[in-house]
Amino acid sequence: MGALKNDRLGACYLGDGQCEFRVWAPHAGAAGVRLQAVGRPPLAMTAEGNGYYSLRMENAAPGLRYFYALGEGMARPDPASRFQPAGVHGPSEVTDREFAWTDKGWINPPLQQYVFYELHVGTFGDAHTFDGVVDRLPYLKDLGVTAIELMPVAQFPGDRNWGYDGVFPYAVQNSYGGPQGLKRLVNAAHGEGLAVVLDVVYNHLGPEGNYLREFGPYFTARHKTPWGHGLNFDGPESDEVRRFFIGNALYWTTEFHIDALRLDAIHAIVDTSARPFLQELATAVRSESGAYVVAESDLNDVRVFKCDGLACDSVWGDDLHHTLHVMLTGERDGYYADYGSIDDLAKAYTGGFVYAGQYSKFRRRRHGNSARGSRGEQFVVCAQNHDQIGNRAQGDRLSTLVDLESLKLAAGAVIFSPFLPLLFMGEEYGEMAPFLYFTSHGDADLIEAVRRGRREEFSGFTWQEVPDPQDERSFLQCCLTPEELWTPAQRSLREFYRELLRIRRETPALAHLAMEQTEAIPLGEETLLVRRWCEQGEAMLLLHFGRDASSVRAACPAGQWRKVMDSFGDAPERISGECEITLARRAFALYERV
Amino acid sequence: MGALKNDRLGACYLGDGQCEFRVWAPHAGAAGVRLQAVGRPPLAMTAEGNGYYSLRMENAAPGLRYFYALGEGMARPDPASRFQPAGVHGPSEVTDREFAWTDKGWINPPLQQYVFYELHVGTFGDAHTFDGVVDRLPYLKDLGVTAIELMPVAQFPGDRNWGYDGVFPYAVQNSYGGPQGLKRLVNAAHGEGLAVVLDVVYNHLGPEGNYLREFGPYFTARHKTPWGHGLNFDGPESDEVRRFFIGNALYWTTEFHIDALRLDAIHAIVDTSARPFLQELATAVRSESGAYVVAESDLNDVRVFKCDGLACDSVWGDDLHHTLHVMLTGERDGYYADYGSIDDLAKAYTGGFVYAGQYSKFRRRRHGNSARGSRGEQFVVCAQNHDQIGNRAQGDRLSTLVDLESLKLAAGAVIFSPFLPLLFMGEEYGEMAPFLYFTSHGDADLIEAVRRGRREEFSGFTWQEVPDPQDERSFLQCCLTPEELWTPAQRSLREFYRELLRIRRETPALAHLAMEQTEAIPLGEETLLVRRWCEQGEAMLLLHFGRDASSVRAACPAGQWRKVMDSFGDAPERISGECEITLARRAFALYERV
């Protein structure tokens, strides 16, 4: 199969007017490069074997626009296009890979130090672009997160989209600023000491502008996904499909200096081969670039991060989110029906998965396996993320569902967990704007199908209550509130998050992520005592979910315990032995052994 | 989920006229037992929760025939029927589980000692029944195999079928002799010191008489198989589907004293759950009954027998077969295109899989992973089996394709391999009858579809050349030649096999199965030297595939080597050091260190 690094695919500008084009089109019979000038016949490419065609062009320059012409077919943009200046249906553009990097000294931090800040480029900054994010990096650095996680930036139709409708895996969204814009952002983030995580989608391509199937067997009817045919990672000619996507992963982590990839919904990748695609991908990313691979999976399957499984570094741990969400909101719809007890929370803290093999009412089958013995950094946890907010009919953030005390409690529960915390943009100051599902497709039928699908998904709402994804206002509503308009309470919540992140960093027992050095003891049905320890110290966290203040009797391990912080202000400063502690409603208190 | 042993499903005769009926029909609304007497309304069953219905009947007796009636639906036979006296569309019959077992002292031999003899009950013995097999057990015992492997016996339509069209996993084929007949066979086999292996099909049900989908979500549209929707082992309500099939496995290994199960084509079972169905099945079979689980898989995936994979004991190793077949016949059609060099054979001997990650031309992708470090008994190998013969247009056995010398060479290559050998019935005396694909469906459209499908599968043949599966003559042609009609050459081949099996048993270095104590060195392009050793001894096997006699120069490890046997009669009796050995065409010679 040769090297997996796929940097000879697509249009490669070599300098001095030389450009090399290469495309995989195993069933095409012939392939050519069609430059944009109308009426000129395509320049014939040379078959290289293995289904590849190539062409060396003289007198080319970055900025040159082209299509591929296959056999008798229409001219189509390059599957490995680096840039689609006029969107998904337009020509591909030759780019210059040169960039004036200034991050030579940058070292990807150990995964244990990651604190993710998930953001959507279009709605995060004023400019709706990468450069708009750059402006806010000092703010993020000051907040105390260590990594920004970008929702997908691969070219999607129009300029308003979460990014999961991307159809050119190698092209950086034109409206965000294209490849140079992304490089500026990564370079600036590294300059601020922030890592950059990129969300990539290897389970499907979007419904509009997906020309890949005209080029080769990228998809297979053997596997179904929620979006149609699955990607072909295990059928005939799948080696080259894998190479395309693994090459894509390496493209980001090498050419763009991306520090970690977040793989979208890997449970939708069906692959029965003896050497799983994702294992191959994660192994290649680690060995070729040193970047991390974080998987989103709803399988609760420890094999996702086992070496002889899919070999990912970490997995999104939704169970902790769901448990917290139910305990804070009382909601029990859909998958929330499976969660909500203090025992679930204890299980999440010590086992990673709440569902580790037991029966799930929502799934109507047993679910998951045991993650005992895993490391804390193998789970990414959150109180909110784009899906948990955006997949609600009205995109309600937690801040619109519960009170300030509950938000603080959620923050403590996540940030002081033995896992990697993820914040969703705006969470840190209790942003009240929704995060709605939004699109800007160009195809009228598709627009209507998405609109109708959305309305049908939320049967408990009238159709007027479900915002139209295609309506620009659905997008504009989601843009974050500028800092100068925050309320005092929002400013103070931001300070609170900042303090939590500082304490996480500076308290050895919290910075040390070890599920095996974590104990979670329910004190009644509303309060959890979480002990965490390491060689350098020991911490004790009391989390109280009751709607009323409550006194709990906690048996402190021998010695004196000093309060590090609490979310309500009047927890006792020192405790020891068997003691009675009064906790305010929806509150936590953190102690450290003296 | 409770116990997996599912002996309370179906009709359970409890003695004293008491019979308990239990059926899983989660969406039925109501269920009843309809006795055969026409016009009587069904007896209402009681909902037990979890989708189960039950009824305790007084005054019942074995032999009572019944259907289930679900909601407003038609009366249908029991999915867990133990017996279908009138075939797949008729009523189910209450059976008596009592049987006068006389195999109390029977101990399942260690897997390392298994030598499989695969047979099809309908065509093996004169009577086309289990009792017909019983008559031949002394012959098999004398031959030296240690286990008979029965092609599937679950009730299929009509009385002529390979068995893979079974539709009542718990019912023993009526025309073979039903459950009592199978018990007589197992009991008699154990009496002769032979283990019994049963081929079971958990990847699909046959096309005719499959009423399971009317009872519950046994199938899922999420997964495709070559036979339509996959079985539901990972979707909603899959726990009970699993229980049905795992209970089935345990039914055979406990109530029928079956010693090992052969799982048909597990690559057609798609299961994305965190706790794979097959892992659960294999673990339950091992712990509840001590029986072995052998999987047929074309994935070349070592995870099939890893504990944290599917946890099977052993897997069919097709690569050795394919390599041998090509070396002996020169055929290169279909998957044979991938095999045939002496290096492939060396790889098969020492690695189990020939394809352990490299590119397969036939599959048009890389295939397999490495099985290095596996144990020899984790592979079952053969020179022929029902599929390799029967999936040819004219069902040709190897004996009709190559000469006697080649048959002997194949026998030596398989029986002296470090794996578990499998013989296909009649192979040991070079049976000339074909093993054709045959059916006796009742549905005219299906008959025509199967006939057409078969003809289309073999495009290199005219349709007259492809026997009609439904024609009774296709079945009758496959019945083995009675011993009294064998030619002298056939009798002598049988003696040859008997001798090979004796030597395998009695030669320590051959009886000891260890891939890591096996070395395979090509001597040119037609000859392989295989060394095998253990603490008790050392053996050296020379396999010569050339169409002409050839002298090879072999470097014997230090010491004197004594000939144990050869297939042609004039290999030197003793060899040592660097020596020249002349091997006849298509021949082997086996030496043991003195």
Image (spheres, coloured by chain):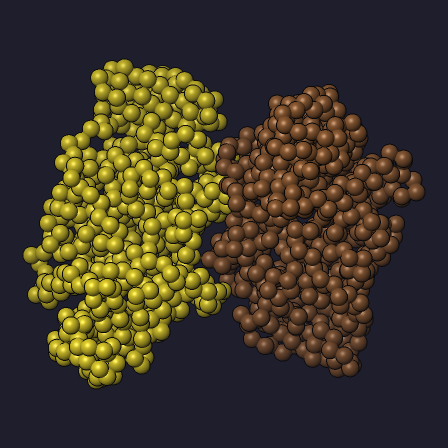
Chain colours: A yellow, B brown
The image quadrant where one finds the C terminus of chain B is: top right
Give percent across and percent down for residue A291: 28, 43
| Residue B347 percent coordinates (x, y) | 57, 35
Camera-side residue: B49 or A275?
Answer: A275
| Relative to B473, B517 lies left or right | left
Q: Quadrant of residue A10?
A: top left
Q: Is residue B526 above or below residue A102?
A: above
Q: Is residue A174 above or below residue B376?
A: above
Name the residue rendered at 30%, 56% in the picture: A377
The relative height of residue B444 versus residue A513 in the rendered view (above or below) is: above
Q: Position of residue A52 (x, y in %)?
A: 42, 25
Which of B539 and B239 lies nearest the eye of the viewer?
Answer: B539
What residue is at 47 percent from the left and 36 percent from the top? A238
Q: Residue at (20%, 37%) from the top-left corner?
A: A183
Q: Quadrant of residue B277?
A: bottom right
Give me the residue at 65% from left, 76% from top: B54
Residue A395 in sight from this viewpoint: no
Residue A132: horizontal and vertical position, in percent?
14, 45
Q: Nearer the viewer, residue B117 or A29?
A: B117
